[in-house]
Structure formats: C-alpha cells, structure tokens
Image (cartoon, rainbow, N blue to C red):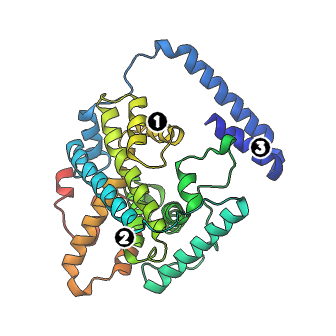
C-alpha cells in the first residue's frame, strides 16, 4: 500500500499537482501506521482467524448462502481441478503457436485496452448477450494501468493484462464491475440502490469471464484463452487458501506460498495483497467461485423452467435488473423457488 501511494504521488505531480500535498500526507500517515504496527506487534497476540463455526454463521445469516465451509472446500477443489484441466487441454491445443508478448509501452497497452473494449461491446450487441443501455460511458477505465516497475517487475494482473486485456476488462469494467455500478446508480429502489452484495458482485464478474469464453469471444485468440483459465485457477485457489487461514491451519505466508504454487504467473506481492484482504474480511475470497456457482445454478433452474423459451440475453438482463442483492434472493424472485431461502429463516 505504501508503494501504491508512492506511485500515486509521482503520477499526480504531472496530472494534478494540487493533490501532491494531500497524497504526501496520506503516505506519511500510512508510514506512521506501519511503524506503530511494527513497534506494537509483540502485544498483538489474538488470532487473526475467526474459526469455521463463525465462518458458517456469517455465510448463512449475513450472506444468505445455502452452503457451509465444508461445501466450499469441496466445490472450490472441484473448480481448481476443472480450471487446471482446461488450461492443460488449451496449452496442448496451442502448443505450436507463439506466446503472446506483453505490451512494451503505455501507448501499445492503451491501444490494446481500447480494442478489447470495442470487441466486447460489438460481441455483446451481435450476439444479444445483454442490453447495453442508453447513456453508457463511451469507454471504461482499466484496473491494470501502465506502470514500469524497478527491474521490470509486474504483478499478476499486469502479467495477464499486458498480454491481453480482455479478461480483466470483462471482469472489472464491461460488463463487470464498472458496468454493474453504472446500472446500480440508475436503480430507483432504495435498498437495491444502496446495498452491494459481494457474492453477487464478484459472482457475476467471474461468471461472465467463462460465459464470454464459451460464447466464442476468444475463438480467434487461442493463447488468450489460456489466460482466462489461469485467472480461473487464481479465483479457485483462493477458496482453499482462505479457509485454511480462517481455520488457523495456514499462516498468511503459508497461504501466499500455496497460491504461488497453484497459479502460473502468481508472485508474492499480489498474493499477499489478496490474502490480507481475505484474512481481514472473512468469506471474501470465496465470493468469486461461489457466486459463479450460484449464478450457474440459477441459470440452469431458469432454463429448465422456460424450456425452448429460455433466452440467454433476457436472462442476463433480468438478473442484472434484480440489483446487487443476494443471489439466493434473486433466484427466489426470478424462479419462485424458495428451497434456498426457506433455510434462511
């Protein structure tokens, strides 16, 4: 985090010099906080993990999920094996192709991002995958902005996005998080306008990665398909790492080492950043995989109900139209099935 604030201060020198003092003050406060943590660390003896009993309570009573930590362990392992299997099949299929070279300049990276977004929008419209509403921004920003780090270092998402921006832009921008937030700002129902369920948010953003892959967006970009499966591996590996930390079986460093051992291109800094979040915010690491699983179950239920009348684009519109609330509640609203929500009260 200190490094990020240092990066930010250098960037605002050129783009918003009036903010240099504010960024510097924030950086100084963060450095003071770090020194306080170091000086007082010996007195911080309480465990960082919460235990699976409280983890299960939170899953049911806060996230309204029909799963336990034991279910997550099994489903997460299944998703991990599935992602690794498809990655190996894809690599075998592409074994004669040259690798994707990372972008070599900010200009090239920006051009790739803009081309990726244009492709996404055109593909959505051509295949009627969902409705792009009026008033949508002409372009969305990227999470992986261009930066040159000492000794050419790059974190995991830079390694992915500098090679091909599609995965990250789908997840974080359109029709993922930024698009999702645009729709929520237009929401008129007060609870659904002001509340954001993490499982629903990350589940949708992760689901659409594979939805686009299976729908054919990457048919002409076979090496980029490998990057999608690597991203899937990363999301799935988080589940075991988080559960092991929250049951007190993994230290943070052991969880970092596990993530690096499971995921190509993973490195310590991004692994630490992610896993610190999941240690501070129990259940957040599993949001991606379990939200996707819930969404796929909802799609299956709805397709079974409608038969030949099922339309994928209409399903996506109805799901997004329900707002960022628990997928269990969205499923009840869309299908009338109450088998999941009955267990909640």
- Of labels 2 and 3, earlier in sequence is 3
Question: Which numbered tag is attached to residue 319?
Answer: 2
Q: Which residue is mark 1?
A: 276
Q: Where is residue 145, by image quadrant? A: bottom right
> Which tag is nearer the camera, tag 1 or tag 2?
1
Q: Is residue 332 visible?
A: no
Residue matched to label 3:
10
Please, is residue 281 above or below residue 230 in the view? Answer: above
- Distance, label 2 to label 3, CA atoms, is 41 Å
Q: Position of residue 111 (x, y in %)?
A: 67, 69
Question: Distance from label 3 to label 1 (Cα)?
Answer: 26 Å
* Circles 3, 1 touching at the beta carbon (< 8 Å): no
Residue ID at (44%, 38%): 275
Are discs 1 and 2 less than 8 Å apart at CB? Answer: no
In the picture shown, does residue 22 fall above or below 307?
above
Residue drawn where x is 30% and y is 29% of the image: 249
| Residue ID at (39%, 35%) | 255
Q: Is residue 275 left or right of residue 343?
A: right
Q: Earlier in the sequence, mark 3 or mark 1?
A: 3
Q: Report the disc number at residue 47.
A: none
| Residue 288, quarter of the rendered image | bottom left
């Amino acid at each position: 985090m200190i490094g990020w604030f240092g990066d930010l201060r250098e960037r605002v020198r050129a783009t918003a010099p009036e903010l240099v003092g504010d960024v510097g003050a924030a950086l100084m406060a963060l450095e003071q906080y770090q020194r306080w943590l170091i000086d007082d660390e010996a007195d911080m003896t309480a465990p960082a993990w919460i235990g699976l009993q409280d983890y299960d309570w939170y899953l049911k009573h806060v996230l309204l999920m029909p799963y336990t930590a034991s279910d997550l362990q099994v489903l997460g392992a299944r998703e991990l094996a599935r992602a690794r299997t498809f990655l190996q099949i894809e690599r075998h299929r592409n074994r004669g192709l040259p690798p994707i070279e990372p972008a070599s300049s900010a200009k090239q990276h920006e051009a790739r991002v803009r081309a990726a977004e244009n492709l996404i929008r055109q593909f959505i419209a051509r295949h009627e995958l969902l409705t792009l509403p009026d008033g949508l921004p002409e372009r969305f920003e990227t999470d992986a902005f261009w930066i040159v780090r000492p000794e050419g270092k790059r974190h995991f998402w830079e390694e992915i996005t500098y090679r091909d921006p599609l995965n990250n832009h789908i997840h974080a921008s359109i029709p993922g998080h930024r698009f999702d937030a645009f729709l929520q700002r237009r929401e008129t129902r007060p609870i659904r306008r002001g509340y954001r369920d993490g499982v629903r948010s990350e589940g949708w953003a992760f689901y659409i990665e594979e939805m686009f892959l299976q729908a054919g967006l990457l048919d002409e970009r076979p090496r980029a398909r490998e990057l999608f499966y690597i991203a899937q591996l990363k999301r799935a590996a988080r589940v075991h790492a988080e559960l092991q930390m929250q049951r007190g079986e993994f230290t943070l460093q052991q969880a970092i080492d596990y993530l690096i051992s499971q995921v190509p291109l993973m490195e310590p800094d991004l692994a630490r950043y992610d896993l610190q979040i999941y240690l501070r915010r129990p259940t957040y690491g599993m949001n991606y995989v379990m939200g996707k699983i819930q969404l796929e179950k909802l799609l299956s239920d709805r397709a079974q109900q409608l038969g030949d009348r099922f339309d994928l684009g209409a399903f996506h519109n109805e799901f997004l139209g329900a707002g960022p609330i628990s997928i269990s509640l969205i499923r009840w609203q869309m299908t009338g099935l109450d088998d999941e929500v009955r267990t909640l009260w």
